[in-house]
Image (cartoon, rainbow, N blue to C red):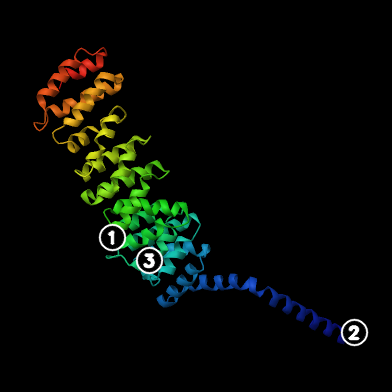
């Protein structure tokens, strides 16, 4: 009787163990499958290796990263030397998304390999654009992905326009920055650049103003936004807006009064623009004379610099300018006198 009870107890214990294992299987299964796939990377059959590597990447298996890196370097299988991870694994967008999603430091080699392969594959495949856009605002990949979009050229514009409308702030900024690098790239982008001239981010305002300027005469609709940017607190923005207005000329001539008013804060950035936007120079010369009469020393000195540059252009009233420069030799500020003595 005791043996029978012992057998029954063993059967019950085994059944309990099977039930416990069955309940834990959903947790154990991914680990077991990962170990099985890692083992298959050692196969001598390239098809088996490729299939295992693809499954591991799509699972975002960090444990597989060192072995796949060795595989791509030709260290795991001397006879198997893939040119790139995308081509080796079929090259689908899901593979790129999974590779960029790996978090370990060792994965950086795979990520650089994938992005470099995408750039070096001839004409970029637009299938990858949505995946790249998803990673555009990522702190690790943002810069590299933006460079990838720039290398794709005009093919990237529709996706970047979608990115510029993203609810994610970082994606919007990276997308807009990449679009600025591709300008001119259509009227929809021009509207976007014009609005971005007032963006809270200084660097982006400057990039947007420069992008507007690349449209030249086609950007006449943006003149008012650029004129507003001439009084920006950031010198880079003011200089970019002035250069853009010069490119849009002659539609931007209404900017002359604002340019003259801000010359003392522009560190020379407005001089060439003023000369280009005011043929004949009458309005500019008169405005500069007013500054010499009532402006502070830095403004008077900058006015002399502008007048000196204008003096050597025969399209401007040289006689009048010379008289103004001679009069400035009597200025109470020594540096203004020195500036006016060397036109």
Crowdedness near tag 3: few (<14), some (14–19) or many (≥20) residues, C-alpha within 10 Å = some
Indicate whether 12 appears above or below 338. Answer: below
Crowdedness near tag 2: few (<14), some (14–19) or many (≥20) residues, C-alpha within 10 Å = few
Residue 266, horizontal then vertical, whole percent:
30, 31
| Front residue of 229 and 45 | 229
Side of 333 relative to 93 (left or right)? left
Residue at x 83%, y 81% (from the top left corner): 9
| Front residue of 29 and 203 | 203
Give the mark toward the camera: 2 or 1.
1
| Front residue of 250 and 154 | 250
Residue, disc 3: 128
Residue at x 38%, y 56% (from the top left corner): 145
Q: CA distance from mark 1 to mark 3?
A: 14 Å
Residue 324 visible in this rendered orientation of the protein: yes
Q: CA distance from mark 2 to mark 3?
A: 70 Å
Residue, disc 1: 154
Q: Secondary structure at mark 2?
A: helix
């Amino acid at each position: 009787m005791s043996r029978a009870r012992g057998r029954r107890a063993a059967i019950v214990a085994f059944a309990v163990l099977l039930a416990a294992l069955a309940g834990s299987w959903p947790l154990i299964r991914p680990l077991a499958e990962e170990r099985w796939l890692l083992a298959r990377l050692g196969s001598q059959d390239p098809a088996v290796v490729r299939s295992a590597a693809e499954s591991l990447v799509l699972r975002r298996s960090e444990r597989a990263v060192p072995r796949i890196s060795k595989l791509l370097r030709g260290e795991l299988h001397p006879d198997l030397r893939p040119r790139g991870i995308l081509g080796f694994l079929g090259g689908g967008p899901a593979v790129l998304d999974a590779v960029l999603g790996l978090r370990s430091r060792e994965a950086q080699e795979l990520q650089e390999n994938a992005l470099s392969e995408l750039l070096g594959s001839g004409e970029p495949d637009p299938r990858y654009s949505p995946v790249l856009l998803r990673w555009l605002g990522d702190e690790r990949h943002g810069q590299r992905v933006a460079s990838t979009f720039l290398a794709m050229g005009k093919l990237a514009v529709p996706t970047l326009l979608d990115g510029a409308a993203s609810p994610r702030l970082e994606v919007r900024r990276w997308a807009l920055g990449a679009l600025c690098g591709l300008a001119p790239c259509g009227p929809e982008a021009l509207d976007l650049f014009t609005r971005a001239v007032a963006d809270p981010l200084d660097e982006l305002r400057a990039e947007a103003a420069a992008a507007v300027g690349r449209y030249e005469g086609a950007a006449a609709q943006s003149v008012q936004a650029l004129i507003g940017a001439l009084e920006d607190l950031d010198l880079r923005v003011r200089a970019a807006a002035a250069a853009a207005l010069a490119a849009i000329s002659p539609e931007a001539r209404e900017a002359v009064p604002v340019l003259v008013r801000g010359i003392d804060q522009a560190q020379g950035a407005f001089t060439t623009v003023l000369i280009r936007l005011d043929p004949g120079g009458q309005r500019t010369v008169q405005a500069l004379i007013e500054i010499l009469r009532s402006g502070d020393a830095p403004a008077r000195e900058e006015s002399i610099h502008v007048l000196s540059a204008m003096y050597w252009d025969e399209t401007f009233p040289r006689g009048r300018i010379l008289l103004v420069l001679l009069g400035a030799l009597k200025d109470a500020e020594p540096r203004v006198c020195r500036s006016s003595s060397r036109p």
